[in-house]
Amino acid sequence: MDDRRFDRLVTLRRDLHRRPEPAWREFYTTSRIVDELERIGVDDLRLGPEILDADARMAVPDEDEIAEWHERAREAGAREDVLERTAGGFTGALATLERGDGPTVALRVDIDGLPITESDATTHVPADGGFRSGNEGYMHACGHDAHAAFGVGVLEAVAESEFEGTFHVLFQPAEEVIGGGRAVAESGVLDDVDRLLAVHVGLDHPTGEVVAGVSGFLAVRQFEVTFTGESAHAGASPGSGRDAVQALATAVQNMHAIRRHSDGATRVNTGVVEGGTATNIVPESARIEGEVRGETTHLKEYMSDRADTVVENAAAMHDCESRITTTAEAPSAESDDELADVVADVAAGVAGVDSILQRDDLGGSEDATYLMNRVQERGGLASYVGIGTDHPGGHHTPTFDVDERSLAIGVEVLAGAVGHCW
Amino acid sequence: MDDRRFDRLVTLRRDLHRRPEPAWREFYTTSRIVDELERIGVDDLRLGPEILDADARMAVPDEDEIAEWHERAREAGAREDVLERTAGGFTGALATLERGDGPTVALRVDIDGLPITESDATTHVPADGGFRSGNEGYMHACGHDAHAAFGVGVLEAVAESEFEGTFHVLFQPAEEVIGGGRAVAESGVLDDVDRLLAVHVGLDHPTGEVVAGVSGFLAVRQFEVTFTGESAHAGASPGSGRDAVQALATAVQNMHAIRRHSDGATRVNTGVVEGGTATNIVPESARIEGEVRGETTHLKEYMSDRADTVVENAAAMHDCESRITTTAEAPSAESDDELADVVADVAAGVAGVDSILQRDDLGGSEDATYLMNRVQERGGLASYVGIGTDHPGGHHTPTFDVDERSLAIGVEVLAGAVGHCW
Amino acid sequence: MDDRRFDRLVTLRRDLHRRPEPAWREFYTTSRIVDELERIGVDDLRLGPEILDADARMAVPDEDEIAEWHERAREAGAREDVLERTAGGFTGALATLERGDGPTVALRVDIDGLPITESDATTHVPADGGFRSGNEGYMHACGHDAHAAFGVGVLEAVAESEFEGTFHVLFQPAEEVIGGGRAVAESGVLDDVDRLLAVHVGLDHPTGEVVAGVSGFLAVRQFEVTFTGESAHAGASPGSGRDAVQALATAVQNMHAIRRHSDGATRVNTGVVEGGTATNIVPESARIEGEVRGETTHLKEYMSDRADTVVENAAAMHDCESRITTTAEAPSAESDDELADVVADVAAGVAGVDSILQRDDLGGSEDATYLMNRVQERGGLASYVGIGTDHPGGHHTPTFDVDERSLAIGVEVLAGAVGHCW
Amino acid sequence: MDDRRFDRLVTLRRDLHRRPEPAWREFYTTSRIVDELERIGVDDLRLGPEILDADARMAVPDEDEIAEWHERAREAGAREDVLERTAGGFTGALATLERGDGPTVALRVDIDGLPITESDATTHVPADGGFRSGNEGYMHACGHDAHAAFGVGVLEAVAESEFEGTFHVLFQPAEEVIGGGRAVAESGVLDDVDRLLAVHVGLDHPTGEVVAGVSGFLAVRQFEVTFTGESAHAGASPGSGRDAVQALATAVQNMHAIRRHSDGATRVNTGVVEGGTATNIVPESARIEGEVRGETTHLKEYMSDRADTVVENAAAMHDCESRITTTAEAPSAESDDELADVVADVAAGVAGVDSILQRDDLGGSEDATYLMNRVQERGGLASYVGIGTDHPGGHHTPTFDVDERSLAIGVEVLAGAVGHCW
């Protein structure tokens, strides 16, 4: 990659890093990406409302919250036309090159930031280099700024190549809340795709290492539980109360005690709990934000069914009502060997790549799985590619950062794989 | 009381002490009592089947168990006629004196022993005196041997007195399992009673102290819970099991966590638990023997309803079935002041009585409450009388014993009260 | 009571009702009371810093919070001299009449409001009458506005009477958080008191009913528990987390399961719980605001010790650290019959009183018990007097209100009792 | 295999099937095996005391229990010399062929039965065929009767072959309680082994299928927990009891709630629980028989440490004492590919084999892992071979049975592999 192009990727990545936007609020980010796409020139450019099934969006924040970030993006200089087209949280973009007959290939990158306060230590490169987050309390702590740069870089490389066929780059919103993947999948815009590549930087792999096909995605369901009882004075009439916090405690204990399953790994977490209003009042309401996962979608269903049963009976046991609502969900998925082999072959010829792993397990969840499953169910192939990067802090920590050398490596591996996808 | 009569009471009490029989198996005991009643001469003598509503008996052991004690009593010298009339566990007796017009007065004593192994320490009077339990593993550890002696002694005293009216002595079986009181009450044999006295020795009161009217009986429900799940190999297929022991544990924790009630004292106990068959098998079945109590019958119902709910939902939470069956039950009751005053007045004139309490709380449960409630509901009065006795060990312990001086005191207080009951 | 005086009491009570101030922030309230005391004329007037042991104050909010209410009181027209003397949350007052030789008698009233939003229904008298709370979110929902009026009214009546001796009226801050009583007691300002009266309106007694001696105060300990574990990604490394929410759930379940006690009533509540930060993160921290109570101080200690043990082991079981800190505490107390008899005798002669109860149980907690115990330990007598009032909503609800006719009744009963306290 | 030899194996297997003996009580079984070994002729024959490290035996029943089965074996016709040498539960045998220079190869089979009552349905072949268990309540429900026949058959085949080297057959006692493997390993008798084969029939593989190298053994720890509290009358003094059943319930709930681990599969089971003595007594003691497992020995340790912590704190939380003792334990193990390949090669040429799996996971635990680890640590190779058999009921069920055609297959595969082990 020539220096000018590399510098442009670095500039883009740093600009996005400076303005991280959380799920469904990537207004500035989308605007900035549109700038680059127009510079490169694409045959078709669709924004949020055109690529999202509105009813399939998950974990969407409330309107006020969305409006506040919309305005913030305007103040940061986002384009009015993009702001208008993405209003209400319909963020993200799908850029398409039409290059005659040939396969339809797609690259999926995600673009949202996290609600984490970025480190201001001088040892933290973005802080020292002047591109630390300006949206205090939010941060690109998972590398989606680099992912957006990958998308732009690969599009530009393919545009300038001999590629024949159709090439899409999906800039997907709301991955961190597992909220956007399903909405894109169900919109059908990728239904004609023969080969789908998704990509992630880091994942504990150093710069120079490439994972050709990541698997081990845990299917996940995130949910919110509310318990409703009846308050009473804890001293004067404890027996007439119906205690939502007792229901909560019973549910927490018994959700963790859901039996392990011999078919594979399962997970359960009660990540946020709260309940009650005063020390001396029997708590009337309580809530849990939790999740279950499974190595397979089936195992996730096992855990999910058991969690429903626990919640229902923990409430009834304490004479309370309960409601459990799914806030986000994603299936598991597998990378196809055939496509991963292509990636591995290409990577072997890319400068800076010194280690190639055929397979690795993610051990977490990702809503790219909706897209992978959709493509695979319709006969296409999919692979989730890992581009190693030296990252000082772990993913989702205040000192996470990407080694920018991996921007070039990622673009070349992915563009090369696109070029060989037929 | 003259010496001869006192010696006879001591002899009787020691004979019974030597042959404690548990609930619904008081065959020898009933036979021995019948001997005494015939010696004294009564106008009517009814045995178990005639004074028990068969369907209202609770906590009845299985037939083999009853048959074994029936045979054991035969070997100990019980009368064949009594054995025949009490076969099947219809033990106990009601002796009646008909002395012309006048009130109907009744004294209720209970006669069963406990499944406790008696101390063989030389400091334990029955061991040293040669009348320790010969039914190893069983013991008169609550003084019902003395109660039977009270019944015989009072009957004899009343028979020789000027008493006019009808006088019953009920020798009630199966108090320790709260199993006999209801069956007698529902048989109706005490429905014509105007004044009912029940009696207990000890209760932490020393020899010479009399409690004229005991109250504070806790209403009680004893129950058995069974949980049924499905076994599975705990290593190879844990997820396909339905774990009855997890249901049990959830139920135990949540039964104890039933909220206190401002209307008064409540109790809960999970006294016996068991479940499962092997270390490496997901347990298919489990059971609890437990109880709830309340200061009032209403509070007992509160606890009972909550316990039902806990059991049902603890089972459902772990995908198990459950069944809860009531094994024994008794209401609360209050001694009537008017009758307690009579007892107090009489006690003041009895030799050896040096302290009279108008009231005291039992803090436990008793199925005499069925009889007290029955009499009170029909317009009669009832009082539960405590006759203090120095007891080295506590009730229900291996070193419990009664100070035999209290035999004379009890008979005189109770016979005196009967004489003044109109 | 003549109309002018009654109208003045009503005006005062309504003015205070319009400006409820929560615990340790009663700046306007103290200022308004000082106005009245100066009007009446007292021999000694001490404010917060002179009557509070600073170290013994409990449940004091943080400085910013106090400063905000201090400023709010200034804006409402509070006197600068009072604001200065009560700065930092040293609110409340002790007014003293020195009337020659004779006993030292004291009346204690409390003056703080509650964090409850007052009803604005037209059926709610204060809303309809234009004296609904102007401090939105706060309310005199327990009648302490009436209590302050009692204090002023009784002082005025005693000042105009023939009373010989010393008479104190304590306007105590911070009762609702059980925070002020101990600080006054430990300051020693009431150490010379021979007769102490405390008073409460309502308590489910109607206008015209007086309770001469309230008992049944539950000793209470309120506490805050924090659990600290270690966060981890719930999907990728659940086993390396140490889950503070599991510790919380175990503690909640087992605190409720602390065994009942035969010595009397106990209580436990986990009134507020919260923990964790995100659905997919093993929770690092969690907290409980809870309380235990007992019919006696001993029973409160029993519950308190058990709660400490539960917390410590629930934390250790889940490899977490825990800390439990007492935020408020109060002992139980008994009203003295001798003093209650005086109150009953006086009440019998007061116009409007149509029912007198010698005794009643509170069933809640109160920090007047610190003062009652202090006086009783030093040889004095104390009684807690209930002045019935028709209250449409229950105590601590948005529609609570006092029937102002009870203002006159309370003043006359209490002033009369003060006059007979020797 | 010729018919005569096959018939002899069937006769042996059926004879053992008729007399199943549980762990450490395989007296008749050992005697019967010795008969066969003497018939074949071996160069060395060592019995229990010579091949077991006495201190390393686990899960040994008490002396009376052992003595009872010793006597039972005598009555069944066991040889006096074998009974004498195996007295005290030192059962099992090691038979050795010394055939000149060459590798040392060993075959391990296990010989104990299970405490399961065998089906008497006519559809159950052993019942119909007259060789159903005569030791009522015990059964060869896991095929160890076939394993013993394998051991004898392979020894005979090798004895008659050209094999050069040393060949051991270990008839190991007490596998079902995971009690014997460690004792043999630590005795050192297999320390010189270059190639170790262990074998199991069935495992859900049909007759004709062979698994060359089984892996996926879960490391396991089985334990017994005792909780000791203090009894009290549940009605009269609940607060003075210390409830061992509450400790048990807390421990059960929290053991199941031990967090999943990302390193691999874990298991936990509380297979047997019991506690308390009477419905109305606060339980003084309680116990759990449970186990934890892990996909690796490290994961088993993780679970084991967490279980220890849960037990200790569940006890302390309820003011009880606890003790946890390990009753059995086994590590995980892996079959060596090199040796498994030999087995697969040989199997391909055996009549009746129609399917060969290179690998399969057990998903359970086995104490052969001690022996496999021992040999591997000293440089040898080990493989655990599965010989499919049609089994109507699952392992450890009353209708388990082996298809005797698999006796011939197993002997030929194993004898062939022994012959190629150099």
Image (spheres, coloured by chain):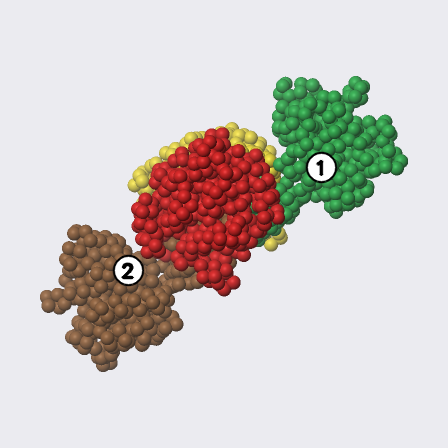
Chain colours: A yellow, B red, C green, D brown
Q: Given the current orientation, which residue lies at the most extreme left position? A: D3
Give residue B103's position: percent from left, percent from top: 48, 33
- Residue type pointed to by label 2: Leu
Given residues C263 and D110, the one toward you in this image is C263
Residue drawn where x is 53% and y is 49% of the image: B1
Hey, which quadrant is residue D26 in on the image?
bottom left
Above or below, D83 relative to D122: below
Give residue A372's position: percent from left, percent from top: 37, 42
| Label 2 sits on residue | D114
Give residue B192's position: percent from left, percent from top: 44, 32
Chain letter behind tag 1: C
Given residues B270 and C91, the one toward you in this image is B270
| Label 1 sits on residue | C337
Q: Which mark is residue B313?
A: none
- Mark 2 packing: few (<14 Cα in 10 Å), some, or many (20+)? many
Left or right: residue B290 compared with residue C24? left
- Residue type pointed to by label 1: Asp
Above or below, A388 relative to A221: below
Q: Are marks 2 and 1 in contact (CB under 8 Å)?
A: no
Measure the alpha-carbon separation of dots 2 and 1.
74 Å
**Residue D235 visible to an observer of this rendering:** no
Quarter of the N terminus of chain D within the rendering: bottom left
